[in-house]
Image: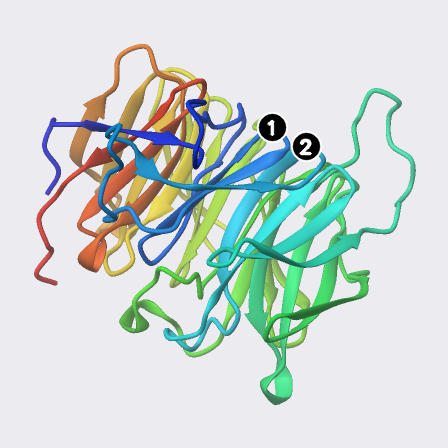
Amino acid sequence: MWGDTVTPVKLARPQSDQYVTPSLGFNVLTSHGASLAYPHLTDVIVIPSTSAPKTERGTLPCLALKCGETVVQTSLLSTKPSDPESPAVLVCMTLSGVQVWDPQTAKKLAAITLPEGDPGPAERQSFAKGAVIVPRADGRHSLIVGSSTGYLHEIDTEGFRFAYNSKLEAYSHSSPIADISSTHEPMYSEAALPPQCSFASACEGGKICVWDATLLNPLAEMHAPGDCITAVRLRAHLAIASTTLGKVMIFHIESRAVLAEIQAHARACAGIAIHPMSLMVASVAEDSHCIVWNLDRVDANEIEVIASTSIKDKLLCGVCFTGERGKDLHLASFDSESIFHLEGDILTK
C-alpha cells in the first residue's frame, strides 16, 4: 500500500523562477492519466506528465494557462468517458462561466458564459463549479456544469467543439453547487464502470442529487443535515461525500440511507478521491492528514483505515490516485510550491 514517505515535487513556470501554488479551495486537484492540474488565481497549472524528467533546477515541467479571471475549480475530463483512449479536455470553472482548453497544446477551445439566474444575496459572488462529461442518447455527449445559483447547465460537446444548450430545469439545489462527479470518471478502470452512467451534484447546503445521465433526470436525493459538502464521488451503489466538518459520509443511493458517517478529520475535509479499481477512498483535510479508507465491507458497517500520513503545517486541499493501476497518490496543498507524492504498491485485485 502506501508508506509514510512523502516526496515533495517542486513545480515552476516555463522559463521563470516563480513557483506556483494551488489556490485555497476544496477539491482543487484533478487528474487524467499521468497529467495533473489545479487552479492558481487566474491561471491553471497543468502538469503534462508526473513521470517527466526534472529540469536542471530540479523542478517538474508544467504549463500555466492564462484564463484572465479567477478560476474556482478545474477538471480534466475525457471527451468520451466510455472510451479509455479518448483525449482529455481541461474544463476551467470561473466567475463568469466555463473555459475549455486542450491541456496538451495549451489552446483554448471554448469560452462559455453561463446565463444569470435569480439574484442571490448581495455578498455572494457568482461562479461556476463542478463539471462532468457524460454519454447521452445516440452516441452524443454533454458537458454538465454547476453554478452558484444551484442550477446545472448542459453544454453540447462533440470532440473539441462545445456549445451551450440549456439550464436543467428538472431539479435545482437551494445552495451553490460544490462539486459534480460521475460513475464514469476518466481515471476509473473499465471493470469499475456500471452499464449505465449516472452523475451526482452536491451543494453547499448538504444535499446530493443523483441523475440519470442519458435522460438528465434526477433519480435520488440525499441529505447531510447541518453540513456543507466539499466534494462528492460515485461508485456502484454508493455516493461518498466530504464535508467542512471533517466528515466522510457514505450513502446508499437506492435507499437514500446513510451507511456510514466517519469523523475522518479534525478540520474541513477538503477533498476525496476513489481508487480507479478498488473501493478505496482517500481523503485529505486542512488538518494536514491524508487517510485511505477501505470500503469493501461498508454494507456490513465495517470500514478499515489502510493508510494514513501527515504533512506538517500543510493545508491539504486536493488528492488524486495516480500511476499504474492507481498505485500512487498525489496531494496538493495551499500556499505550497510543491505537490506531494506518495508511492505505493500495485494492487493485485
Q: Of callouts 1 and 2, which one flags the residue occurring earlier in the amino acid sequence?
A: 1
| Residue 284 in the image: above or below residue 207 | above
Q: In this view, does 94 lie to the left or right of 334?
A: right
Residue linked to disc 1: 41
Q: What crowding class fits label 1: few (fewer than 14 Cα within 10 Å), some (14-19), or many (20 or more)?
A: some
| Residue 72 in the image: above or below residue 347 | above
* Residue 156 in view here: yes
Instruction: Indicate the quadrant where residue 186 lies.
Output: bottom left
| Residue 346 in the image: above or below residue 272 | below
* Residue in front for this viewpoint, 90 or 61: 61
* Residue 206 in view here: no
Point out the image quarter for the N terminus: top left
Q: Is residue 117 left or right of residue 37?
A: right
Q: Residue furthest top?
A: 313
Instruction: Indicate the quadrant where residue 67 lies.
Output: top right
* Residue in front for this viewpoint, 66 or 14: 14
Residue 193: x percent and y percent?
37, 70
Tag shown at residue 70: 2
Amino acid at the residue labelled 1:
Leu
Residue 122: x percent and y percent?
89, 22
Q: In this view, does 287 lie to the left or right of 348?
A: right
| Residue 245 in the image: above or below residue 254 | above
